[in-house]
Image: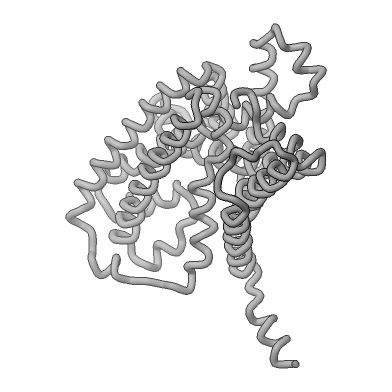
Amino acid sequence: GPGVNLLSMAQNTLGVGGRTISMALYLFIYTATLTAYLSEGSQMCMPLVSRLIGKEIPPWLGTSAFAAVSGLALYSGPKKIDLLNRACVYAALYSFVQLIVRCSGSLQPQLLARANWEVTSTCIPIMVVAFTFHNIVPSLVGYLGSPRAVIKAILIGSFIPFFLYIIWQAIILGTLPESLVYTLKSGTDVVRAIGSTSSDKVSMHVSIFSFFAIVTSLLGIGMGCNDFVKDALPKSFKDFTKKRKRVANLSSLALTLTPPLAISVVAPGAFYAALEFSGTFRLILFGIVPAMMVWSGRRKGELAWVPGGDLPLLFVMAAAFTVIGMEMHAKTNITPWLTKLILRQ
């Protein structure tokens, strides 16, 4: 219900150990994610701001300013965040439509027809990262007020980005040569690559779309992380700030944004490598752990109302372990080692 977050649910169903594991996974995943968003977002807006003021902005200052503006938006509360998020979505959709119109004539069908099934196993974990928004669900329950409204928001909120992702991938894969596609590592790389092969207008709309896509993601994840930190604070601090909401909000917000800001300033590329394994940790936290919470809660008589029996829980855990195995296989390239081991037998 409202005011309850992942840590409270984990402790009630899995005990202190479940809470500790969930906290460690959550902090690692979203510190890495927020670090990446702050670095990418500031890199995209700094050139424009530098042009407007006629001076080069140091990277640390641009990242700090971007984090400060993001913090103000998050401090404004769920209703204002929702309005700001909608405005950003509309701006992103406008640029996206412009991209479709301007790039449709330059799409090359032979580029879209190419396929490389060998890298499929590396794509699924990335899709998991792209569609893991579970951390914001507790915040949505408090904001929307009913499970039915939350389910509707999840379904619509999943379909829209899925549809946009498909078209976005078609634009990139259908306009860029294969040799260039494999060199892309970040959103900034995509902007530069499309800018080098398309008109200035297309490059501008790619930048706008990419920037607002990052901002909308940052707002959603930031709000979820802020509520998570509030839930993680010691009871004594919660009692102290019960009637001091401004102090509580500022404290949780500072704890949410300061670590990723410090990392993005000192070592901006440090967490990009960690993000490569983010899919694994997300599957554990949002696939295996919730299924275990329901499993344990049912046996304690606390979650008997959750429908479906044990079979769906087993399916969720099996699917999560399967994708984790695929990611580990892709990252460690264990196949040659297993082949040698089998031949020795």
Q: Quadrant of the C terminus?
A: bottom right
Side of 103 where 147 appears, left or right: right
Residue 42 in view: yes
Classify residue 332 as left or right of residue 106: right
With respect to residue 253, does 8 lie above or below? Answer: below
332 or 287, nearer to the observer: 287
Counting from the top left corner in percent of width and height, residue 211 is at 42, 37
Q: Quadrant of residue 4?
A: top right
Q: Residue at x 37, y 67 (%)?
A: 178
Q: Judge whether 131 appears above or below 82 on screen.
A: below
Say how the picture is coloured. one colour
| Image quarter (top left, top right, bottom left or bottom right) of the N terminus | top right
Q: Residue at x 36, y 42 (%)?
A: 160
Q: Is residue 62 depicted above or below 127 in this figure? A: above
Horizontal and vertical percent position of residue 74: 54, 22
Q: Residue at x 43, y 34 (%)?
A: 153
Give the residue at the far left of this rendering: 105
Residue toward you, 51 or 261: 261
Image position, residue 269 (x, y; %): 61, 48
The picture places residue 38, in percent across and down from the top left corner, at 55, 36
- Residue occupying the point 39% across, 30% down: 51
Q: Is residue 301 or residue 17 the one in the foreground? A: 301
148 and 227: which one is in front?
A: 148
The number of discs equals 0
Q: Is residue 270 visible?
A: no
Above or below, 221 relative to 312 = above
Q: In the rendered image, which quarter is residue 135 located in?
A: top right
